[in-house]
Amino acid sequence: MCKAGVEMTFTILTNVGQNNLGQIALKMGVMRKLMNGFLFVALLSFKTNGQQMRSNWQEQLKPCEVEIPLHYATKNQSKLIEAAEKYRGVELILVTIDKKNGPSYKSYYLERFQGDFGPSAYLVKSEYIDQDRRPEHVIFLRYNPKDHTFYKADCFRDNSASQALKHNENHN
């Protein structure tokens, strides 16, 4: 009887222990779900605020935006050449969105040139437009439409939304 009583007591304590653990695990699972939900809502609100702040200046500058397909792939050269002809002599602003530093801009001209593989175009820093071309004056940008947007410079400068962006002297 003593042995049976010990086994019974052990079984009861084990069941009680498992039941408490089950309740604790259930409470922890509920808390984890609540925390995940809270974090999701918090991150969503931060992202929405950031997108809203970003889109405010972008929406205000939308009338100044120009389409420059600055892809150097052979299949896109005709579009790039057309853009170079269309914006010949027009100063352009390139806004670059950096995740760490935010948006900044630099002014360029888009110029057509004849290369070994046919016609193409490159960006020339505005301060060098009246000088002979040297390699440090010319930019072949790793263009990404998500991070880079072109605007007509006169429209950009006249728009109050451009005041929120910083001019980047070292921008390549």
Image (cartoon, rainbow, N blue to C red):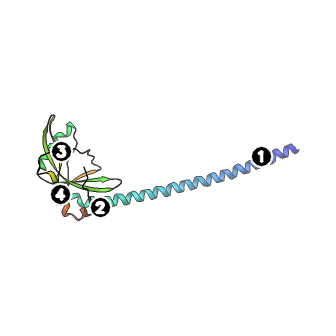
Q: Can you tell which mark lies on residue 56?
A: 2
Which is in the foreground here, disc 3 or disc 1? 3
Q: Residue at x 16, y 48 (%)?
A: 110
- Pointer 4 or 1: first along the chain: 1
Amino acid carrying mark 2 in the image: Asn
Which is in the foreground here, disc 4 or disc 1? 4
Q: Which residue, given by chain and number where applicable, does mark 4 sit on?
A: 153
Circles 3 and 1: CB distance less than 8 Å? Answer: no
Q: Quadrant of residue 69?
A: top left
Front-lying residue, 102 or 26: 102
Front-lying residue, 113 or 41: 113
Which is in the foreground here, disc 1 or disc 2? 2
- Pointer 1 or 2: first along the chain: 1
Q: Which residue, given by chain and number where applicable, does mark 1 sit on?
A: 11
Position of the N terminus, as image quadrant, is top right
Amino acid carrying mark 3 in the image: Tyr
Residue 36 coordinates in the image, percent (x, y): 51, 54
Query: Residue 149 vs residue 154: left or right?
Result: right
Q: Residues within 10 Å of mark 3 (few under 14, many from 20)?
A: many
In the displayed orientation, state which residue is furthest to the right. Answer: 1
Query: Residue 21 vs residue 79: left or right?
Result: right
- How far apart are the two marked residues, 3 and 4, measured between alpha carbons? 17 Å
- Pointer 2 or 4: first along the chain: 2
Q: Which residue, given by chain and number where applicable, does mark 3 sit on?
A: 122
Q: Secondary structure at mark 2?
A: helix
- How far apart are the two marked residues, 2 and 4, measured between alpha carbons? 19 Å
Q: Residue at x 20, y 36 (%)?
A: 74
- Pointer 3 or 1: first along the chain: 1
Residue 52 coordinates in the image, percent (x, y): 34, 60
Q: Secondary structure at mark 3?
A: strand
Query: Residue 83 vs residue 32: left or right?
Result: left
Circles 3 and 4: CB distance less than 8 Å? Answer: no
